[in-house]
Structure formats: structure tokens, C-alpha cells
Image: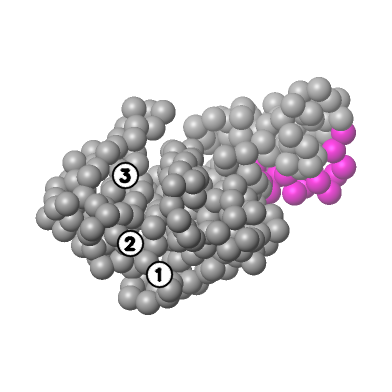
């Protein structure tokens, strides 16, 4: 059976347990990375329930129409389409992020970037007189901006903090706006369609905190991507021949963008932290840098601090 053929045996199953077993077998044949987990997620989605409910109700029946829809999802997953696109959301940092092919699926490692940004903004709100200005570049579907808006809802409402989220992709920004609206914070974040640190992208004071998760795969890696990479927008993956094109452009533009004493937080790919530090030494010789390691032991977030007199 090919990945495009309908798994007719699935139609013969009706209970949650049967559906999971048949779907997992089909996905195992297609050599998906986690067939049982994927099957449980898809069957749970068909029931409108989570996996815990599914395990507690193995004999729950699924109506024929929902079984038919589930059959389609299993076929698409067998062909490689990511679970997050099939379900239309990704659970990330305890949030439900709307996902589709307009933007990348939020990654677990990017939670470190969001948490670091929260800590940095919170510290500045305690120490800094006046308003704190934050800007997330290349926001994509808006996961990081959403996490920040929810964490600092009161500060944003009281104009103690400003938050801008920008991206070169209008489609991605549309998805980001949907995520912000779904959580009731759309009016607290300024959305800007801009290319990196394009002059006058945000207007007003220079940002005190700049957050960026730029494309950092090499062009070869991005174009030959497997798994979810084959389904995600190439513009959000391709970092050029060495994966550093966009990071290089951003670092070069930092001196004319970031406020004196400001902080930039950059997510980088495996093995790229040293190269970015070298770029910083050339563009921002007075800056200090530190690196945060993710759960996989990879140097993932680069923290760049400008001196107060920069």
C-alpha cells in the first residue's frame, strides 16, 4: 500500500482502541518516526479529546463521518505531513499555538529563547526607569510574541512596556495576528511587515530588548529538508550557503538599531554560536556575549549586551 492509498481497514475500526491500533500499524508501515504517538494524537483529535482521555476510554465509539475524516489524516501523516499542520495547532510552552503552512511549527528549543526574553524584560522593568521597548524580529506564527504578551499583559496595558513583532512574510504575520487574537492580546502587540532591522521598521525609541529566531539552516539543508522541514515555508528555513546570511545582516545592523545598554537575544543553530560571536567582535567590539545551552546540550541562545555608552 502506498502512502496515498486509503487505509480501508481503518474504516472497519470504530472504538478508540481499535482506531489507534490500526492507525499506528499504517503509520508504522509508512516508517513515520513515532507511529503510536502520532496515531494517538490523531485519534484523540478526531474525538476532540487529549491522549489521557483516550487511554481512559478505549471503548468509546467514533461516528462514521469522523472515522472517514480520520482516515484522511492518517493518509496525510503517512505521506509526511506534520501532526501540527494536520491538527491545526501545536502545544508549546503550555500554550496552544495555531499552526499551518504559513509559518514554521514552534520548536521546543525556542522555548529557551522565550523564557530568556521574559527574564530579560522582567529584570529591565525592575531596574530601568521609564518604558521598556521590546522587538521580536522574524516572529513567524507569533509564538514568542504571544508568550511575551501574555506574561506582560498588565505592563503592556499600562504602557510600561511596548512590544513589536515583525516579519518579512505577510502570510506569517496574518497567522501571528490570529494567534494573538485567539488569546485576547491582539491589541497589545504592534505588527510590522519588515525585512529584519529595516530602518524605521518600528518607529519610536530604539528597542531595549531585541529577540530574533532567524532562518539558520544552510540552503542545501533547507531545500533537502525531510520530515516537517519538507512542508514548512522555505523562506523561514533558508539561511544562505552557510546558514549565517540573515544572522550576519542582523548583527551588522545592531549598532544602529539597539538602544545603548540594550540586549539582543538570538537563537542560533548547532555549531553557529562561535561564528556569530566572531561577527559580533567585528560589528560590536564593546559588546559582551554569553551563551545559553538547550536541553540537548547545544549552544542555542546568544545573549548580546551593549555597553551603556554604546
Q: How is the image coloured?
A: one colour
- Asked if the stretch drawn in magenta spans residue 68, the answer is yes
Residue assigned mark 2: 259
Dominant secondary structure, magenta: helix
Residue assigned mark 1: 205
Query: Going 46% across and 44% down the picture, which residue do you hit?
Result: 123
In the image, is residue 10 above or below residue 191? above
The single residue placed furthest to the front in the displayed view is: 129
Relative placement, left or right, of 206 versus 39 is left
Mark yes or no: residue 8 visible. Answer: no
- Residue 33 image position (x, y, % from top left): 49, 32
Query: Going 76% across and 23% down the picture, which residue do you hit?
Result: 55
Question: Which of the image's four quarters has the N terminus?
Answer: top right
- Residue 271 image position (x, y, % from top left): 23, 38
Q: Quadrant of residue 136?
A: bottom left
Q: Which residues are magenta?
A: 61-74
Residue assigned mark 3: 303
**Residue 268 shows which numbered tag?**
none
Amino acid at each position: 500500500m502506498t502512502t496515498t492509498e486509503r487505509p480501508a481497514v481503518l474504516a472497519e475500526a470504530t472504538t478508540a482502541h481499535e482506531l489507534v491500533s490500526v492507525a499506528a500499524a499504517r503509520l508504522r508501515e509508512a516508517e513515520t518516526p513515532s507511529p503510536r504517538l502520532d496515531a494517538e494524537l490523531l485519534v484523540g483529535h478526531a474525538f476532540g479529546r487529549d491522549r489521557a482521555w483516550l487511554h481512559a476510554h478505549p471503548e468509546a465509539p467514533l461516528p462514521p463521518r469522523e472515522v472517514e475524516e480520520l482516515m484522511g489524516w492518517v493518509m496525510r501523516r503517512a505521506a509526511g505531513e506534520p501532526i501540527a499542520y494536520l491538527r491545526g495547532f501545536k502545544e508549546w510552552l503550555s500554550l496552544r499555538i495555531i499552526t499551518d503552512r504559513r509559518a514554521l511549527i514552534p520548536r521546543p528549543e525556542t522555548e529557551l529563547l522565550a523564557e530568556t526574553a521574559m527574564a530579560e524584560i522582567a529584570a529591565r522593568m525592575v531596574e530601568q526607569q521609564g518604558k521598556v521597548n521590546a522587538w521580536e524580529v522574524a516572529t513567524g506564527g507569533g509564538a514568542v510574541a504571544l508568550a511575551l504578551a501574555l506574561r506582560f499583559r498588565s505592563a503592556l496595558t499600562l504602557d510600561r512596556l511596548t512590544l513589536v513583532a515583525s516579519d518579512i512574510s505577510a502570510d506569517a504575520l496574518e497567522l501571528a495576528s490570529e494567534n494573538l487574537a485567539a488569546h485576547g492580546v491582539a491589541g497589545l502587540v504592534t505588527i510590522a511587515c519588515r525585512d529584519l532591522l529595516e530602518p524605521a521598521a518600528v518607529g519610536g525609541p530604539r528597542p531595549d530588548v531585541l529577540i530574533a529566531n532567524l532562518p539558520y539552516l544552510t540552503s542545501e539543508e533547507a531545500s533537502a529538508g525531510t520530515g516537517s522541514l519538507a512542508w514548512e515555508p522555505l523562506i523561514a528555513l533558508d539561511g544562505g550557503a552557510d546558514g549565517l546570511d540573515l544572522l550576519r545582516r542582523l548583527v551588522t545592523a545592531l549598532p544602529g538599531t539597539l538602544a545603548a545598554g540594550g540586549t539582543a537575544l538570538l537563537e542560533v543553530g548547532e555549531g553557529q554560536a562561535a561564528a556569530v560571536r566572531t561577527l559580533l567582535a567585528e560589528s560590536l567590539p564593546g559588546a559582551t556575549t554569553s551563551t545559553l545551552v538547550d536541553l540537548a546540550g547545544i549552544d542555542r541562545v546568544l545573549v548580546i549586551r551593549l555597553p551603556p555608552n554604546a
